[in-house]
């Protein structure tokens, strides 16, 4: 059990590092964060990791959206969906009338390392 817990902590640490790399005023999708963190197509793991963050963690969780450029609304998030939208708007991110973010304009693209 301890080994599994250590593995999860390591994965979450990689996920948090990937999320921290998304600059203010940009968003990344769950899929992008999964790739950047090296967890393959385990997109749900990104959601689990972000959901487990304590308040005031310093990790910009609000910058992660679904592949359609939308906030993934969920009634179990206790109002954090609304907070996510407010925080993104404070960063200058705009939503269209359907609640979608233009990923071509506001999407984060990790630069390639040489």
Image (cartoon, grey):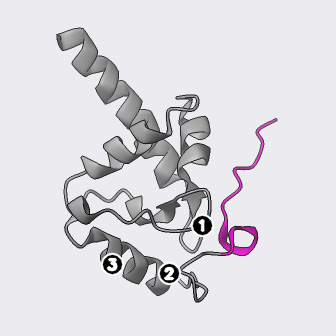
Residue 14 part of the magenta segment: no
**Residue 82: quadrant of the picture:** bottom left
Front: mark 1 or 2: 1
Residue designated by label 1: 69
Position of 54 with respect to 40 (left or right) is left
In space, the residues marked 3 and 1 are separated at their CA atoms by: 15 Å
In space, the residues marked 2 and 3 are separated at their CA atoms by: 15 Å
**Visible residue check, residue 56:** no
**Residue 98: quadrant of the picture:** bottom right
Look at the numbered discs 2 and 3 and tell me whether their residues touch, using CB distance below 8 Å.
no
Q: Is residue 72 above or below residue 84?
A: above
Position of 76 with respect to 62 (left or right) is left
Q: What residue is drawn where x is 34% and y is 71%?
A: 81
Residue designated by label 3: 82
**Residue 48: quadrant of the picture:** top left
The residue stretch that appears in magenta? 102-114
Q: What residue is drawn where x is 51% and y is 45%?
A: 18
Q: N-terminal of the two: label 2 or label 3?
A: 3
Residue designated by label 2: 91
Q: Is residue 9 above or below residue 93?
A: above
Residue 109 part of the magenta segment: yes
**Visible residue check, residue 5:** yes
Position of 64 with respect to 26 (left or right) is left
Look at the numbered discs 1 and 2 and tell me whether their residues touch, using CB distance below 8 Å.
no
């Amino acid at each position: 059990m301890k080994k599994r817990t250590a593995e999860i902590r390591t994965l979450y640490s990689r996920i948090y590092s990937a999320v921290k790399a998304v600059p203010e005023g940009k968003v990344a999708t769950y899929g992008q964060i999964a790739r950047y963190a090296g967890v393959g197509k385990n997109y749900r793991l990104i959601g689990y990791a972000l959901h487990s963050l304590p308040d005031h963690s310093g990790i910009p969780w609000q910058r992660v959206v679904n592949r359609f450029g939308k906030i993934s609304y969920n009634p179990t998030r206790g109002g954090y969906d609304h907070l996510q939208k407010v925080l993104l708007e404070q960063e200058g991110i705009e939503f269209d009338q359907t609640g979608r973010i233009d990923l071509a304009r506001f999407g984060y693209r990790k630069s390639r390392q040489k």
